[in-house]
Structure formats: structure tokens, C-alpha cells
Amino acid sequence: MVIDDPVRAIGLPGIDPELSEAGVGRMVVLRPWRDGDAGDLVAAWADPEIRRWTAVPEPADLKAARRWIAGWDERRRRRLALDLVAADPADDRVLGEVGLSSFDDDRSAARIGWWTAPGERGRGVATAMVAAMTAWAHARPLGLQAVVAEVDEANPASLVVAHRAGYRPLERPSGTARVTAAPLLVSWAGAS
């Protein structure tokens, strides 16, 4: 899978200027959530694999999806999270989501997370959106030094995505305790 076009800058009020759509080539376009996406979000929240690996509200209904989408800009503005839809460039269909959260200015780092709609798995969508978001996060205006993906060892599909997107296992200094049971994968600026 090749990403033809570089990611255009995504601004982040509270972090950087206004958000605009980011082209990621022929496979996906990263864009903000829209109210019309609420049904797709409810369908994603109902998927057993998404529920298994990500936080899903209860109830995960249309009202909750609309509320979550309506709070998108506030979360972005307050530097809590930047969650973007990976949409099909031909028909704007929701293929998945990729987002940054847990911004740590002292360490110049953030956490990345993603999910892919059930019918879109196995086509390279997740790798495309994770690689694009990671490249953008390392570039200006954010210029993060580290983007960290916490992936459970029992989730082989996400481990493959992380590795294909350029992530490498985070090494801990010897003698340090592990904070989480999930393996940590990390991509540093300039990592290939």
C-alpha cells in the first residue's frame, strides 16, 4: 500500500491553528467527525472487536454518538484529544478512526489510538491512517518527539498495524517496573 500524497497540516486550536482536512492519498482522507457520521459511530461501537479493544460508552446509542461528535471540537480545543475519521475519498464513507490523546508537553509526546470498521479490515486502512497521523504528529506544527501506541499482546491485528506504521517496541531502562500489562510500542520522530 502506498500513500500518494503527503499529509497536509492539521491545525489544533489550543495546540495549533484551525483544523482542515488532511489528504492521505487514494486510500483514506482524515477529517473531523460530522453529525451525519453518528450512525456509523453507533455501528462501530456495536462491533465486538471494537468493544473488546477500545472504550465504548454505555449506552452506545445514537444520542451518545451525537453527543460525542458534538464534543469533538471542545476536546480538540482543550488539548484533550484529536480524533479524526478515516473516510473513503470517493464516497466519504467512514472507514475508521485515528486519534491522538494524553498530550504531554514536557515530554513532547502523545498517545495514538485507532479502530477500523469491520468491513474495512485487512485492506491497509488502519496502517494508512496510523502512519499518516504519526507523520503529521511528528511534523510541524506539533513536532512531537514521541507518539506512543499501547497495544495489547492479545490483539495481533493492531500489533501488525503498529509495526507496519513504523512503531517499534519501547525499551525500558533495566530495573524499571512496568506500569501497564499491555506492551508499549513507540515511534520516535524520524523513525522509519
Image (spheres, helix red, strand yellow):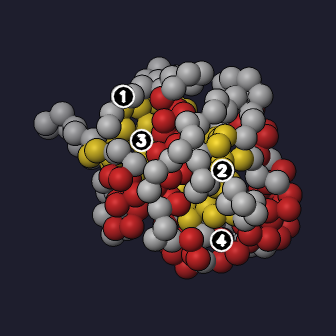
Distance Cα–Cα, label 4 vs label 3: 23 Å
Q: For the point 69% across and 56% down, which residue is it?
A: 89
Would you name the residue on which mark 3 appears? Answer: 148
Q: Position of residue 108 (x, y in %)?
A: 47, 24
Q: Which of marks 3 and 1 is nearer the N terminus?
A: 3
Distance Cα–Cα, label 2 vs label 3: 22 Å
Query: Where residue 190 is drawn, which disc sits there?
Result: 1
Q: Where is residue 75 in the image (x, y as percent from the top left)?
A: 72, 40
Query: Where residue 44 is drawn, which disc sits there?
Result: 4
How packed is label 2: few (under 14 Cα within 10 Å), some, or many (20 or more)? many
User: Which kind of residue does numbered mark 2 sit on?
Assistant: Val
User: Which kind of residue does numbered mark 1 sit on?
Assistant: Gly
Of discs 1 and 4, which sits in the foreground?
A: 1
Q: Can residue 51 be seen in this view?
A: no
Q: Where is residue 84 in the image (x, y as percent from the top left)?
A: 66, 48
Image quarter of the N terminus? bottom left
User: Which kind of residue does numbered mark 4 sit on?
Assistant: Ala
Q: Is residue 24 visible?
A: yes
Distance Cα–Cα, label 2 vs label 4: 18 Å
Q: For the point 33% across and 33% down, which residue is it?
A: 191
From this view, report whether residue 16 is shown above or below residue 67.
above
Would you name the residue on which mark 2 appears? Answer: 29
Q: Position of residue 118 (x, y in %)?
A: 57, 75
Q: Earlier in the sequence, mark 1 or mark 2?
A: 2
